[in-house]
Image: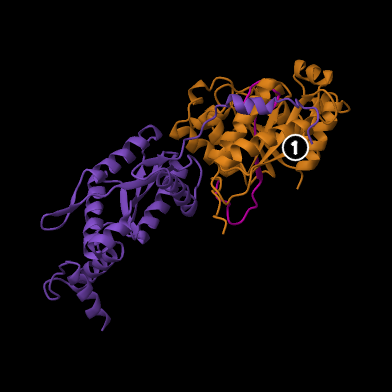
Chain colours: A orange, B purple
């Protein structure tokens, strides 16, 4: 008989209200477009009629505010320190979704203290009943803050580019998530692809290494780790333009190939 | 009558209840219930926790790890070639060995740890808040202490036994399940047994490093060309 699997510690669902799905977006390597994907995916999901909240879980070095060109007076920091209510920190973002920003100055939260854990968990417990989808935009690397944020999510999306360094770090992340959190399905977005089908090939390559090196590390009797490609985003000058202008690609250039790809990913994620 | 049977069980186990008349009825009943609870959680031979108590402690530890993210270690401990002790010296000698090993294990632990006899010659330990860096040290200490203690089985006769130990840490932040955690420790016990016994094997903590071999395969000869 298959032993029951170690489930991720997600906040307990409330008895009455339905619970939104929590997605963690992570990457291993920085600078692969994680925050860009989080924000534009949120916009694409919002266009499909979902209530979406993006939570800036990159507590030490947040930059969702930069991507969205939002510099609010109230951030997660004020919620953590009890200066403000959670409701006051949830802001409407361009693109029709909501954001909970960390602000770039939360260096003291780049280490995972019991207080930070408790605060994050409490916040997620609260927002999970108010939104259809929560996107946790995590920091780069495989720090304990990142791993903790991912552990709070129902599903995890790893963003990688075809660059060897990005693939290596994406693989390291997948390995840790599979062995430490017993993740069985890990979703993959390949950003900045150069040609059609590159994402599929990269998924295959990663899956092959996972099958050979990661699955044998797992307790026997469980299912193998499966990488699921949910889309590639082509290299597109429109992305650079949107990032430079600090606008959402989906708003600035909705017809761009990268914007269309993000729309397709959102459609694939839709329930 | 059930009450008589219960009292007899407690007497046999060495529990002393106050005389029925010497205290009020509620206090007396409470002492009776306490005594029975204690009895139902102990292994009668070694006095250690039994499997039932171990599973309760493990469930509590899983909650704590998931909540606090602290490291915690489970060790499965098995006496090597125990059948040979029984076959050579008889079951009474086997019982003496079990008791002695139980005592050594009990002497090895901190107050917050749990040590249990799981059945037969198998024991288990739960070590809350045990950092991964110390896991192997702790397991080795247990193994060496058991090996260093000869067990007198009859006047002038002693036997020495060794133990094999397998250990696994709870995955931090994650709600584990008791069967899976025990299974992971059992896997390591199997490894210790099959690589020669009288040793401790612990599950390797999570590694995020990517080996040259893995990189080789990731960027291997086919290099994104003819895959799939």
Q: Is residue B209 left or right of residue A237?
A: left
Asked which secondary structure carries label 1, the reply is strand
Q: Where's residue B105, x and y in %?
A: 26, 48
Q: Is residue A25 magenta?
A: yes
Residue A149 placement: quadrant: top right
User: Residue pushed farthest bottom?
Assistant: B1
Q: Looking at the image, which residue is at 11% across and 72% down? A: B22
Position of the N terminus of chain A, as image quadrant, is: bottom right
Q: Where's residue A92, x and y in %?
A: 70, 32
Q: Looking at the image, which residue is at 35% across and 44% down? A: B127
Q: Main secondary structure of the magenta part?
A: loop
Residue with the mark numbered 1: A229
Q: Looking at the image, which residue is at 41% across and 38% down? A: B71
Label 1: how many residues lie within 10 Å, few (<14), some (14-19) or many (20+)? many
Q: Does the magenta stretch include residue B215?
A: no
Q: Residue B158 or B142: which is nearer the viewer?
A: B158
User: What stretch of residues is rendered in magenta?
Assistant: A11-34
User: Residue pushed farthest top?
Assistant: A244
Residue A7 seen in the current view = yes
Chain for numbered disc 1: A
Q: Residue B114 or A106: which is nearer the viewer?
A: B114
Q: In this view, does A124 lie above or below B15?
A: above
Q: Is residue B169 above or below residue B216?
A: below
Residue A69 seen in the current view = no
Q: Where's residue B95, x and y in %?
A: 24, 61
User: Residue pushed farthest right?
Assistant: A255
Q: Residue B70 or A197: which is nearer the viewer?
A: A197
Q: In this view, does A192 lie above or below A244?
A: below
């Amino acid at each position: 008989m298959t032993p029951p699997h170690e489930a991720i510690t997600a906040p307990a669902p409330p008895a009455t209200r339905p619970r939104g799905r929590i997605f963690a977006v992570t990457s291993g390597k920085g600078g692969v477009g994680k925050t860009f994907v989080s924000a534009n995916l949120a916009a694409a999901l919002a266009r499909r009629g979902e209530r979406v909240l993006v939570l800036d879980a990159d507590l030490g070095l947040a930059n969702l505010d930069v991507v969205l060109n939002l510099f609010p007076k109230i951030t997660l920091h004020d919620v953590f320190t009890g200066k403000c209510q959670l409701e006051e920190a949830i802001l409407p973002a361009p693109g029709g979704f909501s954001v909970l920003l960390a602000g770039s100055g939360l260096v003291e939260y780049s280490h995972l203290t019991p207080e930070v854990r408790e605060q994050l968990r409490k916040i997620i417990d609260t927002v999970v009943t108010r939104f259809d989808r929560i996107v946790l935009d995590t920091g780069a690397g495989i720090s304990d803050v990142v791993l903790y944020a991912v552990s709070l999510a129902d599903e995890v999306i790893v963003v990688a580019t075809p660059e060897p360094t990005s693939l290596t770090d994406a693989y390291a992340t997948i390995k840790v998530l599979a062995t430490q959190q017993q993740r069985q399905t890990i979703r993959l977005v390949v950003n900045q692809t150069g040609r059609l089908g590159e994402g599929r090939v990269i998924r295959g390559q990663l899956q092959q290494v996972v099958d050979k090196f990661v699955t044998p590390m797992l307790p026997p009797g469980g299912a193998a780790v499966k990488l699921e490609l949910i889309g590639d985003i082509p290299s597109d000058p429109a992305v650079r333009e949107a990032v430079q202008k600090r606008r959402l690609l989906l708003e600035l250039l909705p017809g761009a190939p990268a914007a269309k790809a993000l729309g397709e990913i959102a459609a694939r994620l839709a329930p | 009558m059930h009450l008589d049977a219960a009292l007899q069980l407690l007497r046999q186990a060495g529990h002393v209840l106050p005389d029925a008349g010497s205290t009020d009825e509620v206090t007396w009943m409470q002492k009776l219930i306490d005594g029975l609870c204690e009895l139902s959680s102990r292994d009668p031979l070694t006095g250690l926790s039994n499997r039932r108590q171990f599973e309760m402690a493990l469930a509590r530890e899983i909650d704590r790890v998931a909540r606090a993210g602290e490291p915690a270690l489970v060790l499965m401990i098995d006496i090597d070639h125990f059948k040979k002790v029984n076959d050579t010296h008889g079951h009474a000698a086997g019982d003496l060995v079990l008791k002695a090993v139980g005592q050594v294990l009990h002497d090895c632990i901190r107050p917050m740890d749990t040590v249990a006899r799981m059945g037969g010659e198998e024991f288990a330990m739960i070590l809350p808040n045990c950092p991964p860096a110390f896991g192997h040290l702790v397991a080795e200490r247990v193994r060496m202490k058991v090996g260093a203690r000869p067990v007198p089985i009859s006047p002038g006769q002693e036997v020495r036994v060794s133990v094999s130990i397998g250990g696994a840490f709870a995955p931090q932040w994650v709600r584990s399940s008791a069967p899976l955690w025990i299974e992971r420790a059992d896997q390591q016990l199997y490894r210790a047994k099959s690589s020669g016994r009288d040793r401790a094997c612990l599950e390797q903590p999570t590694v995020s490093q990517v080996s040259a071999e893995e990189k080789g395969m990731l960027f291997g000869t086919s290099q994104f060309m003819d895959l799939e």
